[in-house]
Image: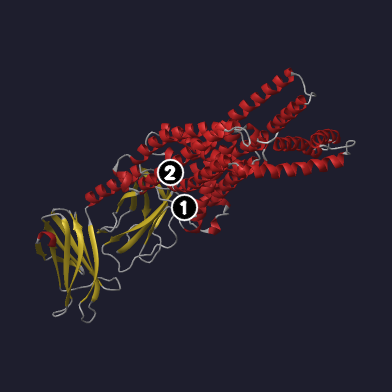
């Protein structure tokens, strides 16, 4: 459950804000006419994606936000903005469908005493974010069970198409995937917008979602699931009827009443054709479903998208065939009356092919999403990837144990019930009783009498054949006894029990692995995270602005206030310094004197005194402030509010 909740955490964005104009925390002398934001990749905007709020919380932006050039976006603001601190909020959707939100401030003339608090949950967070993450997990699980269960039946155990437990498992996968897709479609608008539960059923938001890449992917998934429903109907309908009909014909042939060898050959050919058609159609539907993830998430952005999307589809299919087939095998080992050793061997070979495909596609995806060894340990994506690799290694190790049990199962293909003649007779009687039960369920009295007569002949029944009702009752009793006997034999078989335990362990690890994989799909790739950090550092060096705010109290009458020191470009060499002193109410504080001193204690440099010049009320400035060495400097500001009242406040900052 802990891994499940971790997989449903709020999304970590792919795009990142790497620059803005005005820059974050700057104090500009002239009010801007527009505010621009630069992201690490293209983003999608809506009418309220970019907002600019004045110190009172009123919007001062005008018009709709627009794409200015490349990854730069902007919104115009009212002319002649008064002095104060303005808050810029943004909420956009990155190219890989994840929401991105944040806020920063800049000031015109002088900073305000207070800024506007940004209320509401972050994009992708809150209850809606948790529900969206949970629905994503369910959608992946449903896809794996649906595709893996069908692949197990067609490729490994075709007789399993008639097993009720297998049918329910595959149908449950289809229902889970369909329900989760509809839930994602409803939640999408609120997830990337307000984050409010009330907006989930807003029809206008759903309409907007349908016009996005993520909305198109979800609608395509629903259409493919309709085709998947038809596939399931054929697999568990016409396919099972042909298989059952062939077995019935074989049974009658064994009693001397079967058809000719030409009929058997025709039935076999017809079944092969149907199997091929189902395999081909199922592969197309499964690949299409996998493509709905590839076309809207990480594979659709970044480098080599033309290769990354097919690789992602292959990766998802391999995961589904391996883990979904594993789930089906576990269910069969617990619920099915019998399972041929050949079916387990076939799945073992299929799983091996899937692991090879996962390894090849996973290495490529890791290289594409990380880009460097440092990102493997220095980013959230890389750390999650290491956890996933470790889980896969554990899963493969347990699978190796399962292969050993499979080999033992192959060495002892004869069922335990055949070790003594009495058990063999009971098994034979159970088979014939099952045929009779199926015949009576269809309402065929003639078939029921015939089947019951055959069963009673083996069991020593005397007298004439009973009527159809008695035959059906006898068949049900014999079937119940045979099922109980088969279950007892299954539980007593040490090889089957050992295989069941190892497969159960595999399935447990697979559940955690799926949660980690879900978290990976919502985590910013290491390559883009490092690129965003580098771009932010570069932008910081270009803007070169250091801004510090420190409250002070000289102890005299009205001696409280806040002093802000800005240093531009905050690098080694000459810098321009501005000092702003404001009262608690945000108004400029006319103090008689301000002094600043810089000390680098680790190198024994300083204090280096700086006496700025008074520019205006509450505004002091100094040019050519020399910083001789990069390091963690202590900045001490002395503010004198009267002839005898003054205070010195300090704050550390990294410069250079």
Front residue (pair 28, 412): 412
Q: Which residue is mark 1?
A: 3
Between disc 1 and disc 2, the foreground one is 2
Q: Residues within 10 Å of mark 1 (few under 14, many from 20)?
A: some
Front residue (pair 615, 207): 207
**How much space separates mark 1 and mark 2, taking CA atoms?**
16 Å
- Percent x, y of residue 373: 30, 41
Q: Residues within 10 Å of mark 2 (few under 14, many from 20)?
A: some
Task: Determine which of the numbered discs, if any, sits on residue 101 in the image.
Answer: none
Q: Which residue is mark 2?
A: 394
Q: Residue at x 24, y 76 (%)?
A: 560
- Percent x, y of residue 124: 45, 53
Q: Residue at x 19, y 54 (%)?
A: 569
Answer with left or right where residue 260 lies relative to residue 111.
Answer: right
Q: Residue at x 57, y 44 (%)?
A: 177
- Percent x, y of residue 347: 54, 33
Front residue (pair 412, 313): 412
Q: Is residue 42 above or below residue 557?
A: above
Answer with left or right where residue 418 lies relative to residue 361.
Answer: right
Q: Is residue 364 visible?
A: yes
Q: Is residue 216 visible?
A: no
Q: Secondary structure at mark 2?
A: helix
Q: Secondary structure at mark 1?
A: helix
> Which residue is most to the top?
262
Answer with left or right where residue 247 lies relative to residue 626.
Answer: right
> Which residue is most to the bottom?
557
First in residue order: circle 1 vs circle 2: 1
- Percent x, y of residue 605: 9, 61
């Amino acid at each position: 459950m802990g891994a499940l909740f971790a997989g449903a955490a709020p999304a970590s964005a792919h795009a990142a804000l790497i620059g803005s104009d005005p820059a974050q925390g700057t104090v500009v002398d002239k009010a801007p006419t527009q505010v621009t934001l630069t992201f690490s990749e293209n983003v999608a905007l809506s009418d309220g994606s970019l907002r600019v709020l004045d110190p009172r919380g009123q919007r001062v932006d005008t018009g709709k936000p627009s794409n200015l050039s490349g990854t730069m976006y902007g919104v115009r603001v009212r002319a002649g903005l008064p002095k104060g601190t303005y808050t810029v909020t943004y909420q956009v959707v990155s190219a890989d469908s994840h929401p991105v939100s944040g806020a920063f401030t800049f000031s015109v003339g002088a900073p305000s005493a207070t800024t506007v608090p940004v209320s509401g949950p972050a994009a992708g967070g809150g209850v809606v974010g948790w529900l969206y993450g949970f629905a994503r997990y369910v959608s992946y699980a449903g896809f794996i069970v649906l595709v893996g269960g069908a692949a197990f039946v067609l490729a490994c155990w075709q007789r399993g198409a008639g097993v009720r437990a297998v049918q329910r498992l595959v149908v449950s996968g289809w229902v889970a995937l369909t329900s989760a897709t509809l839930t994602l479609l409803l939640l999408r608008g609120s997830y990337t917008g307000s984050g409010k539960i009330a907006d989930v059923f807003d029809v206008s938001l759903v309409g907007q979602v349908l016009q996005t890449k993520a909305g198109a992917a979800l609608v395509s998934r629903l259409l493919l699931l309709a085709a998947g429903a038809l596939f399931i109907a054929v697999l568990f309908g016409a396919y099972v009827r042909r298989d059952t009909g062939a077995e019935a014909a074989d049974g009658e042939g064994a009693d001397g009443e079967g058809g000719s060898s030409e009929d058997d050959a025709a039935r076999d050919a017809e079944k092969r054709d149907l199997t091929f058609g189902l395999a081909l159609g199922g592969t197309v539907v499964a690949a299409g479903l996998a493509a709905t993830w590839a076309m809207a998430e990480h594979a659709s952005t970044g480098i080599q998208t033309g290769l990354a999307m097919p690789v992602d589809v292959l990766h998802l299919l391999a995961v589904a065939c391996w883990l979904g087939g594993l789930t089906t095998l576990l269910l069969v080992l617990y619920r099915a009356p019998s399972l041929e050793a050949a079916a387990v061997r076939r799945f073992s070979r299929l799983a091996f092919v899937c692991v090879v495909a996962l390894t090849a596609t996973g290495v490529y995806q890791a290289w594409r999403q990380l880009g460097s060894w440092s990102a493997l340990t220095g980013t959230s994506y890389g750390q999650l990837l290491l956890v996933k690799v470790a889980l896969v290694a554990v899963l493969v190790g347990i699978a190796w144990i399962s292969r050993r049990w499979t080999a033992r199962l192959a060495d002892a293909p004869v069922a335990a019930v055949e070790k003594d003649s009495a058990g063999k007779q009971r098994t034979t009687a159970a088979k014939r009783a099952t045929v009779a039960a199926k015949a009576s369920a269809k309402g065929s009295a003639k078939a029921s009498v015939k089947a019951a007569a055959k069963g009673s002949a083996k069991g020593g029944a005397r007298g004439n054949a009973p009527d159809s009702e008695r035959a059906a009752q006898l068949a049900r009793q014999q079937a119940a006894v045979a099922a109980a006997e088969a279950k007892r034999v299954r539980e007593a078989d040490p090889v089957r029990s050992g295989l069941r335990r190892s497969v159960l362990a595999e399935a447990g690890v697979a559940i955690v692995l799926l949660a980690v994989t879900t978290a990976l799909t919502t985590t910013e790739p290491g390559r883009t995270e490092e690129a965003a950090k580098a771009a932010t550092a570069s932008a910081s060096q270009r803007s070169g602005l250091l801004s510090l705010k420190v409250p002070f109290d000289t102890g005299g009458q009205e001696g409280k206030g806040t002093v802000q020191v800005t240093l531009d470009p905050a690098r080694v060499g000459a810098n321009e310094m501005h000092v702003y002193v404001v009262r608690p109410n945000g108004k400029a504080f006319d103090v008689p004197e301000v002094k600043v001193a810089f000390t680098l204690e680790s190198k024994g440099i300083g204090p280096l005194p700086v006496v700025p010049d008074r520019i205006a009320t509450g505004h002091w400035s100094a040019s050519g402030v020399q910083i001789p060495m990069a390091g963690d400097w202590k900045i001490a500001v002395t503010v004198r509010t009267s002839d005898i009242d003054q205070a010195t406040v300090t704050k550390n900052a990294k410069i250079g």
